[in-house]
Amino acid sequence: MAELGYEVIGVDADPDKAATLQAGRAPFYEPGLDDLLAPHIASGRLRFTTSAQEAAEFGDVHFVCVGTPQRKGEFAADTSYLDAAIDALAPHLTKPCLVVGKSTVPVGTASRLATRLAERAPVGEAAELAWNPEFLREGHAIEDTLRPDRLVVGIRSAAAEAKLREVYAPLIDAGVPFLTTDFATSELVKVSANAFLATKISFINAMAEVCEASGADVTQLAKALSFDPRIGGLFLNAGLGFGGGCLPKDIRAFMARAGELGVDQALTFLREVDAINMRRRFKLVDVAREACGGGFLGRRVAVLGAAFKPESDDIRDSPALNVAAQVQLQGGEVTVYDPKATDNARKMYPGLGYADSAFDAARGAHVVLHLTEWREFRAIDPAELGAVVAERHIIDGRNALDPAVWRAAGWTFRALGRP
Ligand code: UGA
């Protein structure tokens, strides 16, 4: 928003995060974000605080962007952070304003929050709610925000639409489609988009299972499918499947909400999508065990990658760390390396071994598992890595390495969905 020309206050309940941001650094890794923050903080156009009151008094438009994680032991989403954000902001809203929810929510949440907001704001219904789901991908957050595929806004009044058109004018003028809907539809656009993406990944991973049973190659299959414009080639990378803070919990929360609405049958297929996805992790462990001669005991296993995807330090529901933990549980001596996520991984999985480089992780290893497709792993020279391992076995969990190159350097190369 500062980049679009607005004066902005960012609020976080966590004083450490607010202080880090005020110092011009993002509290997580996102390519380009620090460079984007610094000039706007230096100019004073962007600042950070922990005071909801300060923000409430300052802003005409308030974006609420808090998380909606999966509830412990349940499929449903925990929307309590949204309630808390509205409760912190509302009592200080003494002039007409627009409060815009960006979080991914169970359908029906916006309507509930609109009532909550009006009840608690001194200006009552003049503090109006709108819903504007966020579609950015981690690792591409800046380009996805400044050049989104579309803007979707759930609104209840022409005034709210006009205000959001004004806010987003620089993007709309640049040709970004701007779609207005009711609250429920805007909430559903977000969860159905993520459900579709998860389904696409699990579809190709289901094909990978059939490829494994029949000797076919899922990467060639996906390539051939991709020429059909009705299918398209994006999100057809077979491998270890999806993780992160979004797709897994969003499909589960979507199923839970459909159940509450009495239409759980409409989304039973997402159970399969989830199951296919989790099976890939077990399959990788099976292939690794086989490469280790049938058991992990006394075997050293190098794990390349800890983040749930490259260009991120996010390890929430990371397939790579899930595999690393399973291998360790079965007796393997695991050493993990990730270009950016090692510190986060160490905090969450203190029992695993860690290294400061791919080569250090691989030293003395009996098998190398490539589980997050960082560019630096693709640049590894198989001959050089071969010189430090105990045995030349590599398993590509992301179908991102070139089997011919590794095999030519004397490695046994295995991948998911390929012979
Ligand atoms: C996802 C959506 O792509 C965003 O549009 C959405 O805004 C975001 O969730 C959200 O709800 O906030 P993100 O979780 O950052 O974004 O990452 P993705 O690029 O979707 O990747 C998710 C997972 O799928 C990763 O673990 C990735 O490795 C895996 N993946 C992706 C595959 O296994 N195969 C593919 O072909 C693509």
Image (cartoon, helix red, strand yellow):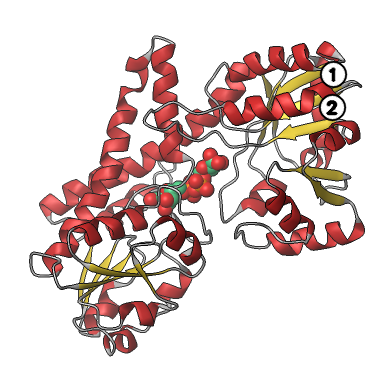
Q: Is residue 87 above or below residue 227?
A: above
Horizontal relation, residue 258 to residue 175: left or right:
left
Seen at 74% across and 64% down, the residue is 35
Q: Secondary structure at mark 2?
A: helix
The residue carrying mark 1 is 159
Residue that sits furthest to the top in the current view: 262
Asked whether disc 2 touches disc 1, contact meaning CB atoms under 8 Å apart, the reply is: yes
User: Which residue is located at x 66 percent, y 44 percent?
Assistant: 148
Q: Which mark is residue 163?
A: 2
Residue drawn at (53%, 58%), measured in percent from left and top?
312
Total labels: the figure holds: 2
The residue carrying mark 1 has its beta carbon less than 8 Å from ligand 1: no
Q: Can you say which quadrant of the picture contains the N terminus? A: top right
Mark 2 closeness class: few <14, some 14–19, many ≥20 residues within 10 Å: some
Quadrant in which residue 380 is drawn: bottom left
Q: Determine the image quadrant of residue 186.
A: top right
Residue 250, image x and y in percent? Answer: 46, 33
Position of residue 224 in the picture relative to residue 254 (left or right) = left
Badge 1 marks a residue whose secondary structure is helix
Amino acid bearing label 2: Lys
Q: Amino acid at mark 1?
A: Ala
x and y, in percent, of residue 145 in the image: 68, 46
